Image: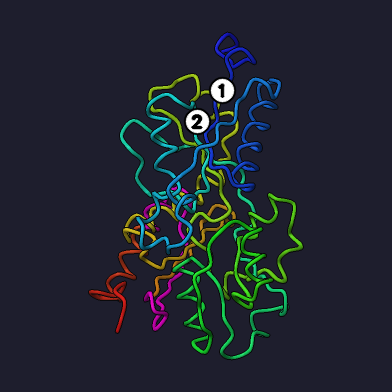
């Protein structure tokens, strides 16, 4: 293995989006690999790749193509050999990878909760009737309207700095971010409060970093095995099986969170109508090794309760 390790002369190329958060995730991956194999930072090269989701900022994600918006160009570079690994926010990842690619390495999961962010209010409960709430997430929009149909929801995209500027410009009174992202940016103070899963169940795989590789690259497979976090993988196996059985995309409001308790996995799942008029939820436990089966069965149960056209917009 030693002779196959990357070096400053032949660095391992790490593909990522160019946002501050994406770069922080790529640097965390680099640092963990460098520590695991006693390599200098110069043995790695971070390659920034702009994605469709980054380029198109003036339209809702659901209008321009779903979850692949933040991954497609990076995966293309991986397939053609332009990069050696790709670092992703797992909540952005489709449940199926392109032929020739595999996603089987996860870093330790950060705080999966949603963050409430406002310049005026400390908690969601403090937001007055009729106020504007900004979000680009169909899940958050639907969850919010289930609880607070009195609020107006406006489209709100961009990185953390862009969204804070929009709050300053009164585009909205408050918004939501991921606590994991704020923690990785060393800016947890931006959150006025963190929303417990009982109040707003997070997106499937929120807070987790996944590292994608070419299926036939045995050198990279061996390196990634050294930094894979098994517990995160077990939790995501259940959550992503839940998502896969629901055919989740940016057009389907879905939430899910798995926790490990002793030898059991506890999974909570939720599906919502896009207009926030109805939400269905479930929770169940199973042995950890049956997590993926539990996720599939929970999704099937919710779909049976929902009936046809549940995810269609009403009106």
Is disc 2 placed on a helix, strand or loop?
A: strand
Q: Answer left or right for 314 relative to 242.
A: left
The residue drawn where x is 39% and y is 82% is 278
Q: Nearer the viewer, residue 89 or 279?
A: 89
Q: Residues within 10 Å of mark 1 (few under 14, many from 20)?
A: many
Give the residues drawn in magenta, as a range: 273-295
Q: Earlier in the sequence, mark 1 or mark 2?
A: 1
Q: Dividing the image into 4 quarters, which one contains the C terminus?
A: bottom left
Q: Nearer the viewer, residue 181 or 261?
A: 181
The residue drawn where x is 54% and y is 29% is 224
Whether residue 58 appears in magenta in the rendering, the answer is: no
Return the residue found at the far top.
3
305 shown above or below 73? below
Q: Nearer the viewer, residue 228 or 52?
A: 52
The residue drawn where x is 40% and y is 35% is 102
The residue carrying mark 1 is: 12
The residue carrying mark 2 is: 85
198 shown above or below 95? below
The residue drawn where x is 65% and y is 43% is 24
Q: Residue 311 placed where, x, y %?
A: 31, 72
Whether residue 287 appears in magenta in the rendering, the answer is: yes
Is disc 1 placed on a helix, strand or loop?
A: strand
Return the residue found at the far left.
308
Q: Residues within 10 Å of mark 2 (few under 14, many from 20)?
A: many
Q: Mark 1 near mark 2, Cβ–Cβ under 8 Å? A: yes
Q: Dividing the image into 4 quarters, which one contains the N terminus?
A: top right
Q: Answer left or right for 259 relative to 68.
A: right
Q: Residue 178 placed where, x, y %?
A: 61, 60
**Which numbered marker is on residue 253?**
none
């Amino acid at each position: 293995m030693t002779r196959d390790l990357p070096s400053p002369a032949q660095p391992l190329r790490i593909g990522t989006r160019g946002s501050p958060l994406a770069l922080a995730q790529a640097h965390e991956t680099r640092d963990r690999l460098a520590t695991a194999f006693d390599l200098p930072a110069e043995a790695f090269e971070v390659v920034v790749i702009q994605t469709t989701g980054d380029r198109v900022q003036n339209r809702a994600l659901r209008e321009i193509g779903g979850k692949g918006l933040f991954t497609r160009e990076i995966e293309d570079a991986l397939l053609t050999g332009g990069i050696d690994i790709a670092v992703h926010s797992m909540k952005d990842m489709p449940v199926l990878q392109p032929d020739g690619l595999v996603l089987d390495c996860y870093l330790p999961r950060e705080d999966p909760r949603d963050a409430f962010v406002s310049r005026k209010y400390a908690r969601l409960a403090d937001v007055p009737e009729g106020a504007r709430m900004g979000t680009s997430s169909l899940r958050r929009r639907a969850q919010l309207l289930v609880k607070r149909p009195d609020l107006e929801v406006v489209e709100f995209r961009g990185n953390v700095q862009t969204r804070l500027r929009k709050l300053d410009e009164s585009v909205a009174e408050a918004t939501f971010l991921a606590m994991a992202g704020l923690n990785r940016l060393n800016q947890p103070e931006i959150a006025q409060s963190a929303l417990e899963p009982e109040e707003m169940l997070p997106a499937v795989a929120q807070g987790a970093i996944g590292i994608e590789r070419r299926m036939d690259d045995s050198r990279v497979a061996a390196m990634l095995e050294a930094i894979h976090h098994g517990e995160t993988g077990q939790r995501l196996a259940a959550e992503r099986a839940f998502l896969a059985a629901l055919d989740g995309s940016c057009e389907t409001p879905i939430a899910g969170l798995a926790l490990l308790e002793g030898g059991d996995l506890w999974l909570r799942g939720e599906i919502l109508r896009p207009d926030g008029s109805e939400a269905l939820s479930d929770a169940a436990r199973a042995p950890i090794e049956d997590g993926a089966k539990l996720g599939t069965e929970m999704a099937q149960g919710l779909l049976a309760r929902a009936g046809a056209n549940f995810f269609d917009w009403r009106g």
